[in-house]
Amino acid sequence: MKLRSVELAVPQADGAAAFLESLWGLFPAGTRGKTRFFRGTGAHPYILAIQSAAAPAVHAIEFSGSSGEIEEMHQRVRRAKVPVKTFTELDAPGGGEGFMVQGPEAQAYRFVAETAPVPALPAERDRPIQITHAVMNAIDVAASDRFAVEVLGFKVSDRTRAMTFVRCNQKHHALAYAHSDVSSLNHIAFEMNDCDGVMRGITRMRDAGFDVVWGPGRHGPGNNVFGYFIAPFGGVIEYTAEIQEVSDDYRVGAPEDWKWPPGRTDQWGLSQKDMARISGPERTFRFPSALRQ
Ligand SMILES: [Fe+2]
């Protein structure tokens, strides 16, 4: 099972698409109706979908797996007596059958069988390969944490004062839930090949007038290198690399395991998170309450 994509509704879809292709480093991967798809250099048919809409929203956090993995997840969710909305063929590149399920704060999770992965593109050191995690703001992090573990079968990797990190494969986290007073998409992380790729991406963005709002740095939980930006379409996006791979016996970290010296929020201590600029965009994309396909 892998985190595959995030689907957003954005008010200025043309501008968002131009930014994603010309500066952020994604490739166009087709359109379906009002939805445009973008891919990285990895083997997923798309990793981001944006739909033109009057107001920003996050329509889906999408996972893909083999038909067997998706069927197993379907059975697991049904056993938990959580409502699901099934579909036989997703209207998106690659199609595939699957289902949607909603978390305790209306988080829309989609699970899709990816039976025909597209060939990977030649690696480019400053373009994203895939997405590697999505972080959500949650009012009741414990409830979302429980849902991820008990309903979806994900594993908790670490809990800090700020958030809970959960994984669905060996990568330290695919999702994280940040303590907040709203339910929203906090940010999406795009995986570069290595630290060099993150630094090149940061410079390309800076040269185009997009200052990094947190980074470069190396996180504690997950040990990944990062640089965060506010996208022109309103959300927070991250270049990241070198996420830690963990084994099944990884000891779940607690808040006391992740304390920083005063003035530090990451391992390097080169930068501070620019809260004045980032906290609004972390709240821009909310989940519509109704289940969507
Ligand atoms: Fe992140």
Image (cartoon, rainbow, N blue to C red):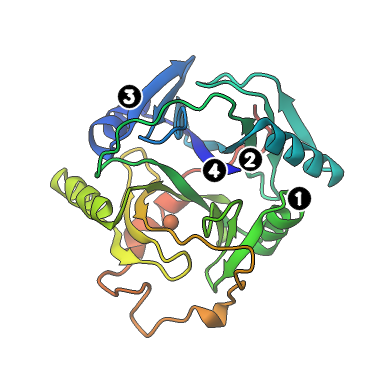
- Which quadrant would residue 126 be assigned to in this image? top left
Q: Nearer the viewer, mark 3 or mark 1?
A: 1
Image region (quadrant) for ligand 1: bottom left
Q: Nearer the viewer, mark 3 or mark 2?
A: 2
Nearer-N-terminus badge (2/1): 2
Q: Position of residue 109 (x, y in %)?
A: 63, 40
| Residue farthest top in this picture | 33
The local crowd at label 4, few if under 14, some if 14 to 19, many if 20 or more residues have their Cα within 10 Å, is: many
- Which quadrant would residue 290 be assigned to in this image? top right
Mark 2 lies on a secondary structure that is strand
Q: Nearer the viewer, mark 4 or mark 3?
A: 4
Residue where numbered disc 2 is placed: 109
Left or right, residue 129 beside residue 116: left
Nearer-N-terminus badge (4/1): 4
Dots 4, 3 in contact, CB < 8 A:
no
Nearer-N-terminus badge (3/1): 3
Residue where numbered disc 4 is placed: 3
Residue at image point 37% right, 40% down: 129
In the image, what residue type sits under mark 3? Answer: Asp
Nearer-N-terminus badge (4/3): 4
Q: Position of residue 204 (x, y in %)?
A: 18, 46
Residue where numbered disc 1 is placed: 151
The local crowd at label 3, few if under 14, some if 14 to 19, many if 20 or more residues have their Cα within 10 Å, is: some
Tell me, for residue 223, which label it has, or none: none
- Marks 2 and 1 sit apart, C-alpha to C-alpha, by 12 Å
Instruction: Classify the position of the C terminus by image quarter.
Output: top right
In the image, what residue type sits under mark 4? Answer: Leu
Q: Is residue 185 above or below residue 89?
A: below
- Marks 4 and 3 sit apart, C-alpha to C-alpha, by 25 Å
Residue where numbered disc 3 is placed: 14
Q: Is residue 16 above or below residue 283?
A: above
**219 and 162: which one is in front?**
219
